[in-house]
Image: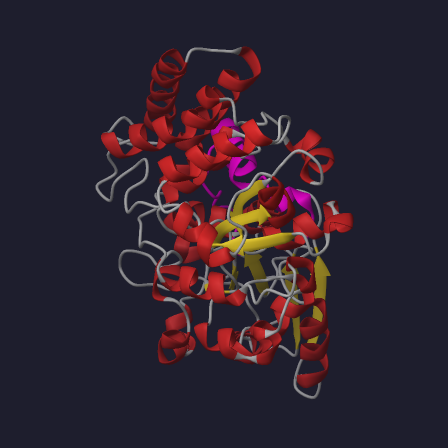
Amino acid sequence: MDLSRRGFLQAAALTAAASGLTVACGGSSGSGGTKNGKNLTLWYWGGALSDKVVAEAKTHFGSQIKLTTASIGGDFKQKLTTTIAAGASVPDITGIKGEDMASFLPNASRFLDLNDLGFKKISSQYLDWKTKLAQTEDGRQIGFPIDIGPTALFYREDLFGKAGLPTDPDKVAAAVKTWDDYFALGSELTKALPGVFLVNNISSVFNIAVGQGTKRFIDKNNHFIGDQDHIRAAWTTAVRPYTLGIDAKINDNSWNAAIGKSLATELGAAWHALDIEQAAPHTKGKWRVCANPVGPSNQGGSYLALPKQCRNPEEAFKIISWILSPTNDARGFTDAAIFPAAPAAYAMPAMTGADAFFGGQKIIDVFGPAAKTIPDSYEAPADAAVMAPYLAELTSIEAKGKKPDDAWKDAVSQAKQIARRQGVN
């Protein structure tokens, strides 16, 4: 896991807008070998799985299968797409990032239906909303959930104390039940501690505000709805910190320097805890976590899938079922802050211990309930591409002083153009 995970939504959206999100459908030759082969390959990216669990899988299945793994750097989606299109050297098992899953669903025939291999029998062990995001309209399941990204509010307990604000997680949560509450607290904070800000940038607010609803930019009938009230409300919410002067206006390049100094809160997913710890180790013990305003949304979380060229589907499914069992899911959280999609893991010792970086707080008490109450929303294949102009225009407000109403009009206009090019009505 690295800091690029923090900006995954904007990066995915901008990439999607530039290149489109359709998986090429090239040749269909296998990845080498024959069906029921004894050699299987697994592709994933750094931080996607617990390296320790993957290493143990090789031993666990070693008498039946030789599992070769590769941690793929760079643009994982592009490399996977290109390989599938070529139809050669396709991995038997592959990761698919959560933000990319919707773009693969129109080409679900390129992957095996996991229900045919036994997923339907164990699907109740995994969060239903997460499972559905890797499911086609006719019920084909192409992704086995690895993890999720339930969001919460990370905050500096010491800075809150200096500003005379509540510091206990329950009391902070009670004080920021709404976005207005949160922004009012931010105004108090900046007044008491000039140079300390509530949010890193307004795109982070927009991402979560959109994710708190049940509708996004495109509906199930493939109609553009990015100009409707629910998106305008998220936009208005996002702009508020800027107009109130409580927005730090920072980007990925300046975040590392700011996180340990001028930022008092961070809105982010469970995996963001490791980002903060890695970037600001000197703040150990000063951070806490509570529920974010209004309610949780999801950011990130990925899947394992079996391309149709998989040489031994039955054994491959056994392998991914073992790697992603609730017990091993809990270990993934300990090893790499990979938050499980299997709720049974939340009660296991690996997840219920006190976290020293967060002052001994048991952060599962916040993220566990959040994971179970994330709204079930539809994400269209072109969703990330259509979202990109909104993020770009919010950045223009911060970086160039563009008027919010002008930025909104331009975002909607650009989004509609992208939607049309992506085949959205």
Image quadrant in which you'd find residue 248: top right
Image quadrant in which you'd find residue 316: bottom right
Above or below residue 194? Residue 68 is: below
Observer-nearest of 125 and 70: 125
Above or below residue 334? Residue 181 is: above
- Residue located 73% across and 54% down the image: 284
- Residue located 27% across and 26% down the image: 227
Observer-nearest of 272 and 302: 272
- Residue located 29% across and 37% down the image: 218
Left or right: residue 168 versus residue 385 is right
Q: Position of residue 21 (x, y in %)?
A: 46, 38
Observer-nearest of 276 and 375: 276
Q: Is residue 201 visible?
A: yes
Residue at the outermost left position: 221
Query: In which quadrant is the C terminus drawn?
Result: top left
Q: Which residues are magenta?
A: 1-28
Q: Position of residue 124 (x, y in %)?
A: 36, 76
Q: Position of residue 401 (x, y in %)?
A: 51, 11
Above or below residue 11? Residue 397 is: above
Observer-nearest of 196 and 375: 196
Check residue 150 for magenta coloring: no
Above or below residue 134? Residue 263 is: above
